Image: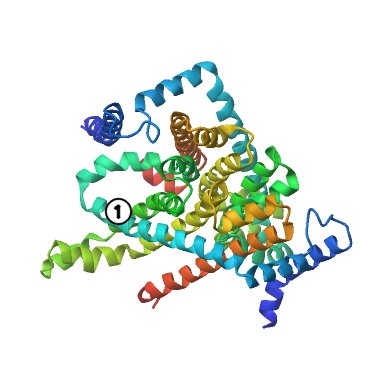
Amino acid sequence: MVAQRKIMNILMGAILPLVVIALWEFATRERLVSPFLLPPFSRVMVRLWDDIVSGELFSLAGQTFLRLAISYSIAVVIGVTLGIMMARVRFVRWLLDPVISIGLPTPKIAFLPIFILWFGVFDTPKIVMAIVACIFPLIAGTWSGTQGVDKYMVWSAQNLGATRRELLLHVVFPAALPQILTAMQVALPIAFIVVIVTEMLSGGNGLGGAMIEGARLADTARVFENLIVIGLMGFVFLRGLQIVRRRILGWHPEVLQEKN
Amino acid sequence: MTKVAIRYAPIGLIVILWELSSRTGLVSQDVLPAFSDVMVRLWQLSADGEMLVHVSASLFRITCGLALGIVVGSTLGFLLAASITAQRLVQPTLTFLYPLPKSALIPVIIIWLGFGNSAQIMVIFLGSLLPIVLGAYNGAKGVENTLIWSARSLGANAIETEWHVIIRAALPDLLAGIRVALALSFVLLISSEMVGAQRGMGFLVAFLGDGGDYAGMFAGAFVISAIGFAADRAYLALYHHLLRYREA
């Protein structure tokens, strides 16, 4: 019964994409839409296959992935560290609080030309830009998560003789983990958006670079091909984070409740 | 007063360090123009009206795009929440499309609409759509059944229930979705203007940077930040105003 329902839901969910693809293919085959504006779906797929076989896709996707992975990991490490320090060290809180409250809601992408001036046009400005764009929600999320840890838990641990270090590692950090992971889930798409934009603006290939090149050379199939790849990557990464979250928080009521 | 001063002292500290490091030649002026030079350039750009042209072009685009996104997105979200069949049809697609980095739409829109106003408005509209749809949808889905049943038993028909109960109860989630969309809209606005536009703040900053007017570039980046910050704060004020009945 449950399995049947699941299959039914998957089938229902597949209707809309299939209809869109069928309409897309039909409209372009019948020349209702100019192939410059929208190439047939099949042609985009053939293009995708060609680039998979030739390895071109993997080299482009690899560049984008590498930039994203590097900038995101650096941002997570620095952001979480600063967030915890803000909650625990008064001086750091004083120093960073106004910076965070002003920096969080501002569109950091405006500083891209400045980073290009400082770091040239290769990988560094792209990575720095992505770090700057996604680190604010990480710091803010970690800070509020660490700040909100239940006082009684902290007192109990202290009462049992936990040192500052033990308290941090075994009580504060695990208790703040759900909010830290939420901040990570917010920050990932931001980093991805920015990596794609920087590739469009300052070259250096990658999927974003390939898309904008396709748009400049009126190679629409290439634009759509990379759009599909970027979409798939975004979906897989966020799903991956969700799975990691469920693994790491296996002990947390949030996951236990879901299992029951 | 002193409290505010102490709180924002780090910002002042950064400005002073910045000014000193570039005045003393510690950092080359070509890399970091002095803060005072940036302010002078900001004044010049504002006084000769150039800044205003670009700011108003950007504000026009973001207002149109976001307004469209709010109207279409919340309508779709509420419709979706009202029909189980629609949910089963659409939800998997939404879940799949949601994590798409919206900036990847910029080249597609450039092909379709070129470099004019409509292109940026379209990018902002499409980018802001999904967070708003999901905000309205989650809000409407989360309405307590007892509220709906009470309204029904008091004689409200489906439309009255939707308007007086569901939309109001869904407001917090919808407004939170719009806040996400607002932040996203600014990123998309500036990015799409940098990629291709003849006017707008994103264009101005990239243009001044390419031309070597670094003080002007910093001034432009600060204006964008200030506008983004002000928009978020204004929206927060509106948010608390609209939801003031909950805080009592």
Q: Nearer the viewer, residue A169 or B122?
A: B122
Q: Is residue B76 left or right of residue A165?
A: left
For the point 29% across and 35% down, the residue is A20
**In the depicted structure, whether residue A255 falls above or below residue A157:** above
Tell me the amino acid under the disc marked 1. Gly
Horizontal and vertical percent for residue B188?
50, 51
Q: Is residue B114 left or right of residue B14?
A: left
Q: Nearer the viewer, residue B176 or B63?
A: B63
Horizontal and vertical percent for residue B63?
43, 62
**In the depicted structure, whether residue A75 falls above or below residue B229:** above
Horizontal and vertical percent for residue B34?
79, 63
Question: Residue A130: in sight, yes or no?
Answer: yes
**In the depicted structure, whether residue A59 falls above or below residue A117:** above
Number of numbered discs overlaid on the protein picture:
1
Outermost residue to the bottom: B1
Q: Quadrant of residue A201?
A: top right
Q: Residues within 10 Å of mark 1 (few under 14, many from 20)?
A: many
* Chosen colour scheme: rainbow
Q: Quadrant of the N terminus of chain B?
A: bottom right
For the point 37% across and 44% down, the residue is A258
Could you say whether the residue bearing mark 1 is in a helix, strand or loop?
helix
Q: Nearer the viewer, residue B228 or A30?
A: A30
Q: Chain of mark 1?
A: B
Judging by the rendered image, the residue that carries numbered circle 1 is B77
Question: Residue A101: in sight, yes or no?
Answer: no
Q: Quadrant of the C terminus of chain B?
A: bottom left
Q: Quadrant of residue B105?
A: top left
Q: Quadrant of residue B155?
A: bottom left
For the point 35% across and 28% down, the residue is A41
